[in-house]
Structures are given as C-alpha cells and as structure tokens.
Amino acid sequence: MLETIVPQIDPIAVPAPIWLIKFLLTFTFVLHLLAMNFVLGGGVIAAVSEIRGRRSGIQHHFDLSRRLSKGLPIGMAFTINLGVPPLLFLQVMYGHLFYTSSIIMAWPWLSVIFFVILAYYGYYLYNFRFEKLSGTRFWVIGGSALFLTIVAFLYTNNMTLMLTPATWKEVYVGSASGAFLNLGELTLVPRFLHFFIAALAVGGLVVILYGLAKQKTEPEFSKWAIKYGTWWFLIPTFTQFVVGLIFLITLPRDVMLLLMGGSITGTVFFLIAIFGAIASVMIFLMSLQRDEPKPLLYAGFAVVLVTIISMVLVRDVVRSGYIADYFTLDQLPVEPQTGIILLFFLLFIGGLGLVGWMLQKATEAAKA
Amino acid sequence: MLNFPVWEIPYLGGGMLIAIVATIHVFIAHFAIGGGLFLVMTERKAYKEKDDRILDYVQRHSRFFLLLTLVLGAMTGVGIWFTIGLVSPAATSSLINIFVWGWAIEWVFFFVEIAAIIIYYYTWRKLQPKVHLAIGWIYFISAWMSLFVINGIVAFMLTPGAWVETRSFLDGFFNPTYWPALVSRTLVCFALAGIYAILTASVFKDKELRGTMVRYAAKWSLPSLFLLPLSLYWYYAALPDVAQEILTGGLPFIYDTAIISVVAGGTLFLLVLMAAWLFPSRVPVAYSILLLLVGFTVMFSAERVREAIRKPYVLYDYMYTHSVLKGEEENLRAEGILKAWGWGMYDEINDETMIRSGKDVFRAQCMACHTIGGYNDVMKLTEDFTVDDLEIIVLELDQFRGYMPPFAGSFDEARAVAEYLMHVKEERFEDLTTIRSGR
C-alpha cells in the first residue's frame, strides 16, 4: 500500500470568511439541487408519461409531457447557471481535494460537459419539435434523461472520490491517463440512488405545481396532475427509506456515528430530515383524500424544502467527517476583501431586481 | 509547490486540449455579446422602418442565437473551467482564490444574462416594443459586463502587473493588458456578430431582403475588423519584453501562428467586403460558412499565441508552467521534485528505480507542456541527443532552451528523466525495427 498524498493547500488566502463561503455554498447548492431535480426528475417523468400515455390512451399524459417539454430547457439553463457558484465555493474550500479527484477520473469527469450538451439539445428538440417528433418523442426525451442520469452518476463518483484520498495514489501510480471511476467505493451506488430518487420525487412536486396552476382553466387535467404528481412523489420517497438506510449503513462507521450523536449539527439536521421525510409522506397521502388539497399540498412543499435544506447540511457534516484526518477548514489562510464582497452583494441584489422586473413584464405579457 | 498529480493526455497534451475547448467557447461567447447588441439594434431598425420582414428575420435569428449561445456557449464555458482544473490545477486554484469575488460577480451577470435572453426570446411580439427592447438591452449589457469581469482574470495570467508585489485584487484585475484586451475583445464581439448574421441572412429566399441584411451585417464586421489591428498593437505594447520577443520570432512556430492569425484576419475582412459589395443578395450559405471557418482560424491562432507567449509561466512572474512557484526552484533542486511532488512510485533513485522514477519526473516536470509522440513531442525535440546531452540540457533548460522554465529537481532526477527518455527512444526504435523487419 502506498502512502496517502494530499496536495498542499493553496498559499493564497481565501478572500472571505469561511462561514460566508460555506453559507453561499449551501444556499446556492440547495437552489441548484431544486433546479437539477426538476430537469432530471421532470425528464424521467416526461419519458414515462410518453409511454403510459400511449398505453393507457389518457390524453393527460401527453398534456403533461407537452408542458414539461416547455419547462425543461429553461430549467436546464438555470441548473447550469446555479451549478456555477456551488462549484466555485467548493473549489475555494476543498480545491486541493477536488482537483485531485477530478484528475484521477479526468476523462469521465470531462465527459460531463459532453453529456449535458447532448441532453440539453435533446430537451430543446423535444420542446421545439414536439408535434413533429410524435413517435420518436420517447427516445428523444428518454435519451436526454438518460444522459443526465449518467451526469449524476459521474458527479457521485467525483464527490465520493474527493473524500477518499487513500485511493488516489494507488490509481495514479498505475496510470496517469485519468480513466478511473470510483466503483470500489461502497457508498457510491446507494449515494447515487439516494440523489436520483430524490430527483424523481421533486419532479413529482413540479407536476403537482402544474396541476395547481391549471385548477381554474383545466379542472380535469388539474385534478389528474395533482394525483399523478403526488404518486410520483410518494413512490420514490417510500423507496428512499430503504435506499437511505442502505446509504447510511454503508458510510464509514465514524462518519455514520456523527449523525447519531457524534456531531450536534449532524444529528439535529439528520433528525429533522428524517422527520421531514416521514411528515411529507403523511401530508401527501392525506392530500389524496381531500377534495380541496391545496393547503395540504403547500404545507407538504414547505416540509420538503426544510427536508432538502437539512439533508444538504447533513451532507456537509458527512463530508467533513470523511476528510477529518486529512483536512479541516480552519487550516485555510483567510484575508477577507471586504470592498469586493460588498460589491458582489450589491450587484447580486441589483441583478435579482432586474430579473424580477423582467419576469413581471413576461407574466403580464403571458396573461394578456 | 502545489503538488497535484499531472494528467497524461495522449497526442494532444494539456495546452492543446485547453486551446480547443477554449476557442470553441470564445468563438461562441464573443458572438453571444456582440450578437446581443445586434439583436436590439436590428429590432429597433425594424420598428423604425416599420419593416415586418426585418422583424421576422431578427426573431428567427434570435432562435439560432438562443440555441447556440445558451447551450453550446454556456456549456463550453463550464467546459473550460473543467479543463483548466484538470490540466493546470495549481494555476486554477490560484485564480480561484485571488478572484473568488470576480468569479462570483461574473456569475451574477451570467445569471441576469440567461434570464434576459430567455425572456427576450419567449416574449417576441407579446410585449410592447419598448419593453422588449429594454430586455434586449439588459441582455447585452450583462453579457458585456461578464466579459468586463472575465477579461480581468484572463489578462491577469499574462500580465499580473503590480499584483505580484501588492497581492491586491484591483491591481491584479486592472492589470497592464486589461484595457487593450477589453477593447480588442469587444471589437471581436461586433465582428463576429456581423459574420454570424451573414450566415442567418444567407438562408433567405427573399433576394432583396438578403441583400439588405448582408450589407447591414457587414457594417458590423468591417469597421471592427479594420480597428482590430490598432487595438492589438496597443495590446502588444503592453506585453512584457519576453512575450514581445517570443511573438516577434523568438519562437518560430508562435511567430508563424501569429502570422496565420493576421493573414486570416485580413482575408476575413476582404471576404466580408467582397460579399457585401459584389454579391450581397446572392451570398450562398457555403460562403457564409467559409467566413465562419476563417473567423475560427483567426480566433484559434490568436488564442494559441496569447497562451504561448506566457512562457515560461502559467501565471506570469508567479507560477511556472510546471506549477512550481517562482523562487521555489532552488529548494526543489536541493530536495528533489519527487519528494515534494509525492505522486511518484519510489522515494529513492537507484539503478532499479531509475527508469520508473524518470517517468515520474517527466510527469511532474515536463508533461504540462510536452507529450511523447504527440503535440510538442519531446522525442522529436531531442532526436539526436545522447543520454548525457539530455541530462545537461535538462539541468540548463532555462538557459539553453529558450522560454522553458528551470528544471526544479535534483541532479539524480535530471539523470533519471534523461535515462527514461532514452529508454523510451530505444523501445520505440526496437518497435520500429521489429515492424520493418516484419518479425
């Protein structure tokens, strides 16, 4: 066994307090997850609906996939955009780990770009040629969803590989060609499934939202979509209890214990996440019985959001636990650039304002 | 040193891989900026002249624009980021740490930019012209602002200026080549806007409209292409002496690449001029694709040159191409690179570990620029050398081989890499004789 090598920390100081970087990482990562879940989960749901629509003859399936076809490319744009800040802040804090694992699996990692481009054009094709494609539609949307699933799998590879420096040298000494995948990692498959299944569930919530938006204008479709979306949330989330459990027990023992008393943050948010998941299942199950499910559904959305945020915080504790022997954040040199930080926040708020104004104009136009 | 493993990329080498991804990106990204202004100005023209055909044209052009810039433009941008992290992790890490807030600000503009272009595209003929135009303006301004930001970081790599002393964000950002680079890139944006517009106009059936639009599009390219040499000269004047020397013949193949860029630029000017002057209403699609190809050649060779004149640094006056920080080489010569790098198989060099350690030294010190048997082939460059020649040259790289960084390793390691290269040579020679003799 070769000794473990972890590259040195960059001597150039981090130009912001670490808590700020961490906050922005968490905040933007949650947004990225939501958008990503929509494009991945929504893509799978659209593909499945194409088939179910054809088999059952229920037109609502096609109405739904038509709506999804319009939303997915836009969702892609924001998934990519919102993926930039978390990746940036990740590099600020964990760059020496992340670059190294990326190099070890360079070709698979770089292929992410290729797969996203293919999936993205597939989504646009599905949108712009929806009618003309007719019979081949399933293949286009299914292909795109498959490419994004591959991307998710590659991300899971890198995100686990960056946490396990002990693997690196052995692989690199053998070959520097960067063709590695982290298939030996015990948590790889459960972790990937955990994220993938969550995407399906959140995709289901978007279907519910489509349903709610059409309550007045298309009551029948609305009712159907709310039910259909609810099941898309419930079935994956049931499965999640099993997959999540497997993920938990495949974690290294000392990392797992962090979530069971070892770390206060880890334990508290882990409990919130578990209760959130259970509560959301109950709420959405109850909503199926109601004639006017709206209030329950909104409550369900809120609980899911809290669950997702808690899970992201738990994920952070797991990451720190994995690498505790090699690196802790307090090792980073810090020299905040206050002026530029302020400029960033000013521009960010201004940017949000501009986008808000444009959205308002666009909504007005859509209503007119 | 920031001791990252070095990725081995067969045939291309890291520099070429970056150049390919980067050129595809900038060729679209500059269009995404200039083309944004083209959209609003042309839309305004259509309203002013009350010409619905022109409005139709801009609307169709905007779909092409959306599909190209939003998908391929954005993703190849992320692609460059992925690629530089893989090929030059140490330099990428430094750029990220120095300019975190620059990157973050650029992201804000990117965010506004994509929101604006999506809304612009989906609200055609649904909004009052004034409001729709305003959204187009928001798009163009935020797109150009993202250039304003990224230009500081890109120019920094070649001319960090006072940053090397002060380590201040603003010194690094508004560095000696910042303004000439910004002006040059802005001109390229408008030149490309016109050339892409000729492409979308050349598919028109309506001959008269095609003529009008081709002439109009040429008005975007020609002045920009005409002014470009001036701003590039300004850029040249702001370069470090060594970079100027490389560019004017110090490295013959870089000089040649620069000449290709200039000649292709001139050709592009003439081709656009000819199209607009002689046969605007009959410009075939193939001709406009030719324009794009020539434009691509200009960009590819210009970006190649910009990267190459940075030798022997990856971040000027701060970090060498092999990721060793300037000033660190003395220590590394005493202690040895393999120990500091950590990714080699053996700690000690002896007769048994010689070849393998030489390979590891090659990975650590040479592979950032050289390949074996591909681009910048080290075999070809050392064709007639004996192992002793190799050893001496390696130790004196920065003296004898112009524009290479100093070898940052021990005497033993220089010997090892020489032995390794000889070994590869002999192996290849044996392979060749085996093939030739048909055994």
Image (cartoon, coloured by chain):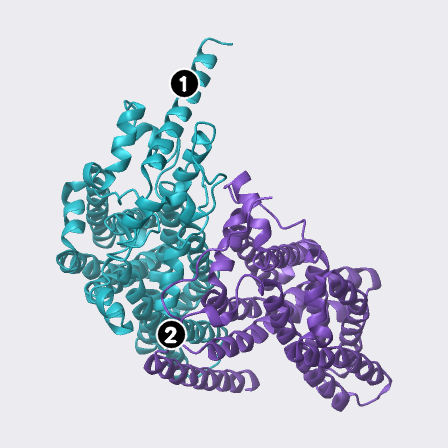
Chain colours: A purple, B cyan
Give the chain letter at badge 2.
A
* Few, some or many residues within 10 Å of mark 2 (<14, 14–19, 20+): many
Q: Nearer the viewer, residue B138 or B289?
A: B138
Q: Nearer the viewer, residue A289 or B84?
A: B84
Report which residue position mark 1 lands on.
B429
User: Which residue extends farthest right?
Assistant: A289
Badge 1 element? helix
- Confirm whether residue B207 shows in the render: no
Report which residue position mark 2 lands on.
A15
Task: Write down the quadrant of residue A43 in the picture.
Answer: bottom right
Type of amino acid under label 2: Pro
Q: Nearer the viewer, mark 1 or mark 2?
A: 2
Quarter of the picture containing the C terminus of chain A is bottom right
Task: Write down the quadrant of residue A344 in the picture.
Answer: bottom left
Q: Nearer the viewer, residue A140 or A267?
A: A267
Using the image, determine if residue A207 lies above or below residue B35.
below
Badge 2 element? loop
Residue A168, position as x, y percentages in the image: 56, 49
| CB-based contact (under 8 Å), mark 1 and mark 2 | no
Residue B72, position as x, y percentages in the image: 46, 58
Task: Write down the quadrant of residue B101 in the picture.
Answer: bottom left
